[in-house]
Amino acid sequence: MEAITLAMAKGRTTEKTMALLEAAGIYFTDINESSRKLVFYNTDESIKLIFVKAVDVPTYVEKGAADIGIVGKDNILEAQTDVYEMLDLKLGKCKFVVAGKPGQYPDKNLTIASKYPTVAKKHFQKRGTAIETVKLNGSVELAPLIGLADLIVDIVETGNTINENGLTIFEELEDISTRLIVNKASFATKSASIDYFITNLKSVLE
């Protein structure tokens, strides 16, 4: 079988993802958390693992720099890339929400702060509500508190950060978890290797 390239990010689900890969018989024995090395090979060198930023994983896969990727659904939805989403790894479960100051949900002239402006725009377009978006890369909860935005669209796991900042959740949009995505050309040209990889992962998820 042909070698394949796997793109994934270091982050909150990396440890659980690596444990899942090991359960499926895929071992990257030289990975060291303190290392800045970005490229690793599994024990039989049939899989090259590259570490990239989570937001870039869908792009690496869409452009063919990686055959497969493991990344959160939030980044897939925001990237709007043309890839196959093949498997829900059921890791890092959270959800998209609309939140803001209690009792303050204007129905027009909305400004939405989010790390996910594309997701926010698509949600409000479905409702027929025009919005302006403010792209933020962190501390999104501050935006309604200081008047930068009316509402936020963000991902939450427990909702504690929302509550601790005096905000309330108005809507739950979509459940998020870690997914396996595949480059469309690779799916055709490296089907045996990719099928084998997915089948092994499925076997430990069931």
Image (cartoon, rainbow, N blue to C red):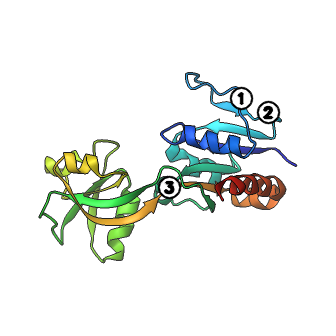
Mark 3 packing: few (<14 Cα in 10 Å), some, or many (20+)?
A: some
Residue at image location 15% in from the left, 48% down from the top = 145
**3D distance between C-alphas at marks 3 and 2:** 28 Å
Q: Which amino acid does label 1 sit on?
A: Thr
The disc, 3 or 2, on the residue closer to the chain's N-terminal end is 2
Q: What element carries label 2?
A: loop
Residue with the most extreme left position: 103
Q: Residue 177 carries which label?
A: 3
Task: Tell me the residue that label 2 is attached to.
Answer: 43
Q: Which mark is residue 29?
A: 1
Q: Is mark 1 on a helix, strand or loop?
A: loop
Residue 146 is situated, as x and y percent measured from the top left of the image, at 14, 46
Q: Do the residues labelled 2 and 1 touch (CB within 8 Å)?
A: yes
Q: Is residue 96 above or below residue 28?
A: below
**3D distance between C-alphas at marks 2 and 1:** 7 Å
Q: Which amino acid does label 2 sit on?
A: Thr
Instruction: Judge from the rendering whether residue 144 lies leftward or rightward of residue 88; answer left or right.
Output: left
The disc, 3 or 1, on the residue closer to the chain's N-terminal end is 1
Residue 185 is situated, as x and y percent measured from the top left of the image, at 74, 59
Mark 2 packing: few (<14 Cα in 10 Å), some, or many (20+)?
A: few
Residue at image location 35% in from the left, 43% down from the top = 137
Q: Which amino acid does label 3 sit on?
A: Ser
Residue at image location 32% in from the left, 70% down from the top = 124
